[in-house]
Image (spheres, coloured by chain):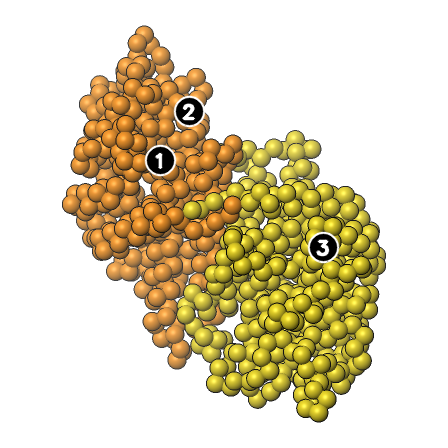
Chain colours: A yellow, B orange
Amino acid sequence: MIDFEIPEKIAGTRLVVETVAVNMMRPVSRYFDEHEHEIPWDYINFMHTATRAMGGSSMVPSEKKEGPRFGFQRLAVMVEMLSWGDAGIYLCTPGGMLGSAAVSATGSPEQKERFLKRFRGETPVFDAMCMTEPQCGSDTSAIRTTAVLDQEKKEWVLNGEKIFVTAGHKAMLDSEGFVVVWATIDKSAGRAGMRPFVVEAKTAGCQVLKMEHKLGIRASDTVSIVLQDCRVPFENILGSPEVVKDQATTGFKGAMATFDATRPIVAAQAIGLARATLELLKEMLAERGIIIRYGLPRQKLSSVEKEVIEMEILLRSAWWLVLKAVWMMDNGKPNSLESSMSKVRAGDVVNRITQKAVEIMGPLGYSCEYLLEKWFRDAKISDIYEGTGQINRLVVARQILGYRSSELR
Amino acid sequence: MYSFEPSEEQKMLIDAVSRYASNDLRKAAHEAEENKELSSKLISKGWELGILQASIPEAYGGFGERSALTGVLAVEELACGDLAGAMAVGAPALFALPVLLAGSEEQKKQYLPPIIEAEWKPYSAALIEPAFDFDPNDLKTTAVAEGDNYVLTGEKTLVPFADKAEAMVAYARLNNETKAFIVPKGMTGLKIGEAREKFMGLNAIPFFRVTLEGVKIPQANLLPGDFAPVLDGSRVAVAAMAIGVAKAAFGYSRDYAKDRDVFGVKVAQKQAIAFMLAEMATEIEAIRLLVWEAAWAIDNKKEDASQKAYLAITGAIDMTMMVTDRAVQILGGHGYIREHPVELWMRNGRGFATFTGLAMV
């Protein structure tokens, strides 16, 4: 039965998160945009205490076996609201970002317990995902970081360089967290040789180097990580250590399973930012006497009204794509198509809306007196990370055409 | 609780409608458009699916409750077969549903059973006016109370089956509000254009210009209820049909692109084309959810149902133009040739900007 009503339990969570967004994020939005690399500890500590008090351990949905499952729907709704508060500060939320998502999607029950329990401790802990390398971004099959098994010591030895690691500094230097490093155990096997490894904070041979200066989401750190003979226990490999060559995608499947779960969440982040922008735009217009007249034929609308109505259509339809993707996730339905669709659409929509909002408000939109210009800068990343808009179009195209990656490159 | 899956009952209906749409409507579409005629046998078969009958309560001759959501699911499938066929099958709804939504108990008892319990007969609605800034909430056609009558004056266009319709609902402005009036056939002052109107698409349906020259109708023919639910029901129906047309165009151009060779590969293996298709599919799915949401809001009597229906049709207008245009583009020169259906879908696609009032759920 088709239903667009938010489940009661999620509505409750949403209300709580809204309070956080209004009181702890918006007031410091501009400060952390202007003070890149400062860490919003007030928000972080509050979120940590609050999630602990609610009995939660991290933002990663737990695996309930019976009854309706809401985990990813709840997460999407929370992320949308936190990002409405501030997209950069949201990325500083402790306990369960992309690294945890990879552990959840590809780890064994023992690994999940071992790696994720740290989020339930006294102090906030962070995690991150290391995929991109200096020479490759979207083409993840070209990664060069290697993992070699030291049979004697039963350890993996990692070597390589990872860049654009979101929250890597917080995961490795500001807390007892971890990063999930994608490396190849058999270069000749291509994607089938790719495996995720958990590298914990303070592991020898793992160094956090450069902190990037970015267009937006400045509250969130983005770092480079260098692995030099970095040794991790054998049990830190997520998924099977066997390479089955005739199944060309075995290893990469882990990454893809992670993306199916994370892409709609990143899309939710875009939607939150887009909603914030549209709401502020409508407020600013209303203060200047422009109220949107819904219901009129286009021929009777002003150009600004047309733009705003179009934005609203983009925003709402994109949000339902996100919710459908996470609803499928919760219900165990394969959602690669919907997951990438939601990401494509949300990435487009948030850029369209933030760009138009700055345009419509003219000098006020361009001014740092308001947050519109910041949101314009924050928005762009949504169409880049977790699969660029183009990579996600490729995923969607292959799905609708029934093509393998070799058939549609 | 969020769910994006139709009920079992709805799935059965979708199945039945889609079989009729692809086996019957789609196969007849080309000839119907070229010959400007739909066979009555074809329409009757669609009528027997019982889409309208299932939305009318037993008390008035039907066998169900009206659900805008079930309606949009059904008409999307119909329109994916053929838009003209879909509108023809649904023509009686243009009369019956406004009566159900805005009529008095007496009017429902009087008008609904003869439509619902009988075979398909032409009924019609006269909403659209021949003006560039036509606005259903600000009609130029007027209704003036005069003794025991209302006098209707104005001009309507795109009135389907007007020449043979048993009766029509005509919309007019009464005290600054749009109201619906039942106009039986043959009323004095009701002028049906002599020749059929010609349009860019939808040639299989006979459309007429209708002039109301001081048509006097009894007071009892005014449907007392609000116009808003009627307009909302039409907006989501037309939007759902736009999705159906877009789905047809997307499917056809995708299959063509997978079949045709170019530079040693299939057309679909070129990213330029594959990305167009990916965007078409994404756009269709996004707007479909928007239309479902609006229909759901109507069924659940949400306060903002009218605004949602407005956003749904507005989004659907752009979506279907974009998708049908690209379908023609993907077929290239062949898309421009009338042997392929995509050019018809593109003509129909543009029409959605003006089709509100030609379908109801």
Q: Badge 2 is on which residue?
A: B226
In the rendered image, which residue does mark 1 sit on? Answer: B66
How packed mark 3 is, by other alpha carbons closer than 10 Å (few <14, some 14-19, many 20 or more), is many
Mark pair 3, 2: CA separation = 46 Å
Badge 3 vs badge 2, beta-carbon distance below 8 Å: no
How far apart marks 2 and 1 lie (CA) works out to 17 Å
Q: What amino acid does circle 2 point to?
A: Asp
B44 or B255, which lies in front?
A: B44
For image coordinates 45% across by 40% down, the residue present is: B296
Q: Nearer the viewer, mark 3 or mark 2?
A: 3
Q: Secondary structure at mark 1?
A: loop
Residue B221 location, x and y as percent? 30, 19
Q: Amino acid at mark 1?
A: Arg
Give residue A154's position: percent from left, percent from top. Answer: 70, 87
Instruction: Report x, y in % for residue B146.
Output: 33, 10
Residue B247 horizontal side relative to residue B318, left or right: left
In percent of the image, x 47 and y 45: which residue is there? A3
Would you place residue A262 above or below residue B135 in this image? Answer: below
Q: Is residue B354 at all visible to an observer of this figure?
A: no
Q: Are marks 3 and 2 on the same chain?
A: no
On the rendered structure, is A114 left or right of B279? right
The answer for how far apart the CA atoms under marks 3 and 1 are is: 44 Å
The quadrant in which the C terminus of chain B is found is top left
Q: Is residue B15 visible?
A: yes
The residue labelled by disc 3 is A90
Q: Is residue A110 above or below residue B123?
A: below
| Three-letter residue code for mark 3 | Tyr
The answer to whether B243 is drawn above or below residue A104 in the figure is: above
Mark 2 residue element: loop
Determine whether the residue tagged by mark 3 lies in a helix, strand or loop: helix
